[in-house]
Amino acid sequence: MIAELGHFSLVLALLVSMLMSIYPLWGAHTGNQMYMAMARPLSVGLFLFTAIAFACLTYSFVTDDFTLSYVAHNSNSLLPIQYKYTAVWGGHEGSFLLWVLMFSGWTFAVSLFSKAIPQEMVARVLGILGVVAVGFYLFIIIASNPFESLLPFYPVDGRDLNPLLQDIGMIIHPPMLYMGYVGFSVAFAFALAALLSGQLDSVWARWARPWTQAAWAFLSIGIALGSWWAYYELGWGGWWFWDPVENASFMPWLIGTALLHSLAVTEKRKLFKSWTILLAIAAFSLSLLGTFLVRSGILISVHSFASDPERGLFILALLVTVIGGSLLLYGLRASQLKSVGRYGLVSREVMLFGNNVLLSAATLVVLLGTLLPLVHKELGMGSISIGEPFFNQMFTVLIVPFAFLMGVGPLSRWKKQNLVDLRNQLVMAFIIAILGALAINYSYDSLATITLLGSFLSIWIAVSTIFEILQRTGNQFSLSSLGKLSRSHWGMVLGHLGFAISIMGIAVTSHFTTEMEVRMSEGETVALSGYNFTFKGIVSIEGQNYSGHAGIVDIHKDGDFVSSLRAEKRFYSVQRSTMTEAGIDSNLSRDLFVALGEQLKDGSWALRLYVKPLVTWIWIGAFIMAFGAFLSMADKRYRLSKFATRKKAVLDNNAVPQGVPQQ
Amino acid sequence: MNPRRKKRMFAVSSVVAVIAAAIGLMLFALSQNIDLFYTPSEILHGKDGTRPTVGQRLRIGGMVVEGSVERADSSLDVSFDLVDTGPTVKVVYSGILPDLFREGQGIVATGVLQEGNVIRADEVLAKHDEEYMPPELAEAMIGIKHEKPQYSQGTN
């Protein structure tokens, strides 16, 4: 009964989205106020009906309603209760329902926080979101319905949730990632609305920026959580595999980063207009491409569970429609967008342009590395795979100019910058970075080019970011002068510092990680990077829906006890699959990581041991970046409801808002 | 040239230069990092008329022959045979095999071809499903494109 209600609610949401795709856009076109005003109530309806559908599916999971095919395939009566909630998005249909829930949530948020934006623009933005929604809802109802019933022949118990997904990381990773993916639809809708209306100025950029920042922040968190999950759950100690699905989430992130910076130029200098539009279209298209790649089953990866070529075709059609349609509109309208400002060859504009070029190039590298094997295969040239070294080499090359610009860019002025004026700061930053990089390598007792480079770039970015704050505050680090910097400025600072922290983590951990695969019998001790790992033996463990055993490993350093780790091997009886749960002792300077292998003939066990320095920095950096983006959103000038209604006329002329001292 | 046009020229040419450099680099990096996929019979008989050469990096997919897994007594070295439709190829590997590595199951390994049809693998992958067969292998063995193992959705 509840399930039918959910299904019905989903169909209602589809109907609402159809209305939403027609009336507001038509109203904006003809100037009909009543039609335009329908946008907000419709978006509320869309969110409401989708939320009801989602709640119904959750209810079916919690009450073990195995008459639903989706529940029967992804849950089990023995599944711990918290995982019954998260199993809702553990398979294809449910994760797509989560996707549309997020989508309608964003739509609702736009209608809620757009009081200061003119009616016509709101109608266009929501109307375009409505058009996209029709595609999504049609897809979920026709090709991927989570409410499909198994009646009258339904199983007594479910097939259980994939054990890989029974984990805290999995509870939050998909929602965050989807928030990011879907969030770019708002930037996309703003871009198309700008094309339709022809209004693309600083005011527009100020509307679009916080939404882009929000989407980007969520995507950053989602990617970081996914990487962290892979690190501790897959038992290989790796944090990034250049897996096609990881790439699928990384591409919108790269383009989204470019979009953030391009939007800054559009807001402050009214430049890069058509480029910004193109990036907004690209970011959302890549999000859709990601969905297509993950869900169509044409990729082989950890994530390609529950794949189906027909669904792939549907998403492909959706993808072609969205990309084709928006690019067509872009082609027709972009020529009207004129960027008029002037700037010199050495200026912040050019550096941000360089940032955009490099980020686009990076996206292209990932796109090529992800799609080439597919194309190769479809052309009948045989299966190939592209190894990790390809991506690593390309990114090592791209990051050097990128990091250089990241240091110089914020220090330079808009319009024109004389590099000689920055000489002192740049030389200082360079020297500090060189010394710091050497010191870091020295502390690990060896010199490695790649770490030297990485830590140099990281310190370079961090030091020049600090110089930039000093420059803004007139070289005084007093609280009051720091407080004068705007929140969006602090957002930028945190974004860059977070990036520097991540780079440092990557540089150090990828070279100074020590690992060992050993046979150990009870009581045996091996030494790795100054830590003594002692195998204390095996205990058996019993969980609600699994059983297994855990290897206990005590770790000592210089005779002092550090930690006792449990490396588990779990057998999930319903799915008949074995899972490794690594034992990890984590702090800021290093992670100690133990994974249990199989038992060998003589009774000893195979164990995998790692000492991974600074590995947590990678994720900490990502969270700081995301926090920076959230802080930016909270900037005064985006609080449009209070600000813009008062000063709307002034806004466009007054490109640099108060609170940011102009240089 | 007036300054405006000069600036535009600079912008365009720098973009072209960056793109050219990027493509060049990319092709270079690609040429070193593409691993072709083979099945055991393709290793022996060649694929499209060419046999892989000794020392070549490649990926191999096949079913692990029952009873062929041998562990060394004092190290983590392990060897096993892979088969598809005819001949077998030996894979040697040092380290811990994935959780779902089992005899009779399909796996994919990446490594370097040695003398005597032996592959020294540095990576062995098995999927989280006992019915799972790498799609390439399913194609090679059954000879039908897009033939998927018939397990129901959502179970991996």
Image (cartoon, coloured by chain):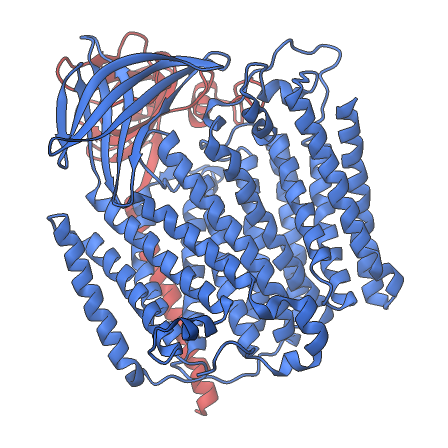
Chain colours: A blue, B red
x 60%, y 48%: residue: A182
**In this rendering, is residue A12 above or below A193?**
above
Q: Nearer the viewer, residue A264 or A630?
A: A630
The x and y percentages for residue A38 are 84, 56
Locate the N terminus of chain A and report the quarter of the image it occupies.
top right
The image quadrant of residue A464 is bottom left
The x and y percentages for residue A307 are 56, 30
Q: Nearer the viewer, residue A30 or A567?
A: A567
The x and y percentages for residue A522 are 18, 14
Q: Is residue A175 left or right of residue A580?
A: right
Regarding residue B92, the answer to whether it shows in the image is: no
Q: Is residue A523 left or right of residue A160?
A: left
x 85%, y 68%: residue: A31
Count of numbered badges drawn on the protein: 0
Regarding residue A325, the answer to whether it shows in the image is: yes
The x and y percentages for residue A244 are 44, 40
x 33%, y 69%: residue: A466
The image quadrant of residue B21 is bottom left
Locate the C terminus of chain A and report the quarter of the image it occupies.
bottom left
**In this rendering, is residue A653 above or below A511?**
below
Q: Nearer the viewer, residue B32 or A138?
A: A138
Q: Is residue A72 left or right of residue A147?
A: left
**In this rendering, is residue A206 above or below A11?**
below
x 52%, y 27%: residue: B145
